[in-house]
């Protein structure tokens, strides 16, 4: 299915861009994927997307930012297959897990980016951030219901952010010499995610971008 009026502004390295792209792939919706004109801080891009952030979905004269808002909008525009469970509690859990990813899991990992250059690295900060990341994953263990997806037998909003973040975690673990301890649910979840149509190629492409970026930060 193609929507010629819809544009997703995204960046190859942006984990939240991949989050939105996985939602589109799950729904089988093809849109125009573009990088922000002049970069996401440019005046040209802010004229299109006032928030100046990525990802951003532009649907005709409607511009939307924030990955969860984008995904829920897509879920209403294209109801099947749904990215939210039918039961009220299950929907709330999926939203909660997604928010915990965005506000606890991913930020603790992103804090490591500034420590990549060896010349300016703060090893105590590295340890602190990895410990925070491990604690945030332990929280997900407590609140999710993996079977094999994080909130049951179907891929949902809860799962969308984790593929990029866990790729980053593995690759940053290699870069910093940190042993990334994968959660008990990870292997079955990863196989289930990659089995979704179009997902494996998106994840492979993203991992290549991440590896190249990390290498560029560690001359």
Image (cartoon, helix red, strand yellow):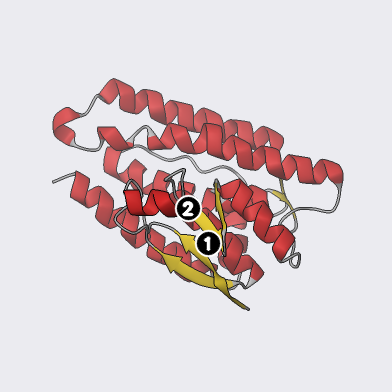
At 56% from the left and 42% from the top, the residue drawn is 183
Q: Mark 2 falls on what kind of element?
A: loop
Circle 2 crowding by C-alpha within 10 Å: few under 14, some 14–19, many from 20: many
Q: Which residue corresponds to the image point at 68% horizontal and 33% vertical from the top-left?
A: 142
Residue placed at 34% from the left, 43% from the top?
A: 172
Residue 162 lies, in percent from the top left, at 54, 48
Closest to the observer: 217 or 72?
A: 72
Q: Residues within 10 Å of mark 1 (few under 14, many from 20)?
A: many
Check the picture and name the quadrant holding the N terminus: bottom right
Residue 121: image quadrant is: top left
**What residue sits right under mark 1 in the picture?**
21
Q: Image check: 132 left or right of 218? A: right
* Vertical side of 218 occupied by 122: above or below: above
Of all residues, the one furthest to the right in this rendering is: 87
User: Which residue: 70% across, 59% down?
Assistant: 75
- In the image: residue 66, left or right of residue 167: right
Please give the residue where the numbered disc 2 appears in the rendered image.
Answer: 55
Q: Work out whether residue 168 can be spotted.
A: yes
Above or below 196: residue 46: above
Q: Quadrant of residue 117?
A: top left
In what element is the residue under mark 1? helix
Does residue 14 appear in the picture of this structure? no
- Tell me where residue 180 appears, x and y as whole percent: 43, 40
């Amino acid at each position: 299915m193609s929507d010629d009026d819809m544009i997703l502004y995204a960046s190859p390295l942006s984990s939240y861009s991949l989050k939105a792209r996985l939602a589109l792939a799950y729904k089988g919706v093809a849109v125009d994927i573009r990088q922000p004109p002049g970069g996401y801080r440019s005046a040209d891009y802010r004229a299109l997307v006032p928030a100046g952030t990525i990802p951003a979905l532009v649907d005709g004269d409607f511009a939307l930012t924030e990955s969860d808002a984008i995904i829920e909008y897509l879920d209403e525009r294209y109801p099947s297959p749904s990215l939210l469970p039918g039961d009220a509690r299950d929907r709330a859990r999926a939203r909660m897990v997604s928010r915990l990813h965005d506000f606890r899991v991913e930020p603790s990992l992103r804090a490591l980016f500034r420590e990549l250059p060896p010349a300016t690295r703060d090893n105590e900060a590295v340890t602190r951030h990895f410990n925070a990341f491990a604690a945030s994953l332990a929280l997900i263990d407590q609140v999710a219901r993996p079977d094999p997806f994080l909130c049951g037998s179907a891929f949902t909003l809860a799962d969308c952010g984790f593929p990029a973040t866990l790729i980053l975690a593995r690759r940053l673990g290699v870069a910093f010499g940190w042993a990334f301890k994968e959660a008990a649910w990870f292997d079955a979840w990863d196989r289930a995610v990659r089995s979704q149509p179009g997902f494996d190629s998106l994840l492979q492409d993203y991992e290549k971008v991440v590896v190249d970026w990390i290498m560029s930060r560690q001359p």
